[in-house]
Amino acid sequence: MEWLIPTLVLAVVGMAGLLAWHSRNRNPIEQDDSDPDNHTLRSDYQSGMGGGNVATWKVPKDPQDYAKLFVPSDKKK
């Protein structure tokens, strides 16, 4: 019975390590073949206490179109 608690602690630490390693190596860019002009990006945050947020958004693949997103709409040309 004295081996049970250290074994459980080691198992929990091992699973947490595997989860962290898997999350670190996950690709944040999802390829979407239905929209060839945009990249689909994903942001995944988990606090570990039951909270978190997952957000996805699309950005243009063309660098000039991407740069235009940062120019205010009332800017004169």
Image (cartoon, rainbow, N blue to C red):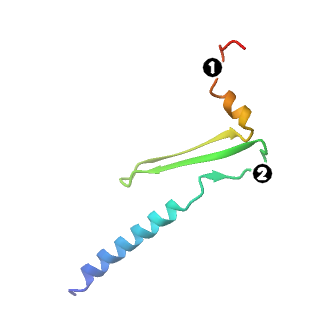
In-front residue for pair 62/36? 62
Helix, strand or loop status at disc 2: loop
Disc number placed over residue 26 in the picture, else none: none
Q: Quadrant of the N terminus?
A: bottom left
User: Residue beneath label 2, please?
Assistant: 33
Q: Is residue 1 above or below residue 45?
A: below
Residue at left 77%, top 44%? Answer: 35
User: Residue beneath label 1, please?
Assistant: 72
- Amino acid type, residue under disc 2 in the picture: Asp
Q: Residues within 10 Å of mark 2 (few under 14, many from 20)?
A: few
Q: Is residue 5 above or below residue 55?
A: below
Q: Is residue 1 above or below residue 73?
A: below
In this rendering, position of residue 11 left or right of residue 60: left
Mark 2 and mark 1: Cα distance apart in space: 30 Å
Percent x, y of residue 37: 77, 41
In this rendering, position of residue 57 left or right of residue 5: right
- Amino acid type, residue under disc 1 in the picture: Pro
User: Badges 2 and 1: C-beta atoms under 8 Å apart?
Assistant: no
Residue extending farthest to the left is 2
Where residue 10 sits, quadrant-wise, is: bottom left
Helix, strand or loop status at disc 1: loop
Q: Quadrant of the C terminus?
A: top right
Q: Mark 2 or mark 1: which is in front?
A: 1
Percent x, y of residue 7: 30, 81
Percent x, y of residue 23: 50, 60
Residue at left 44%, top 48%? Answer: 52
Q: Residues within 10 Å of mark 1 (few under 14, many from 20)?
A: few
In-front residue for pair 5/38? 38
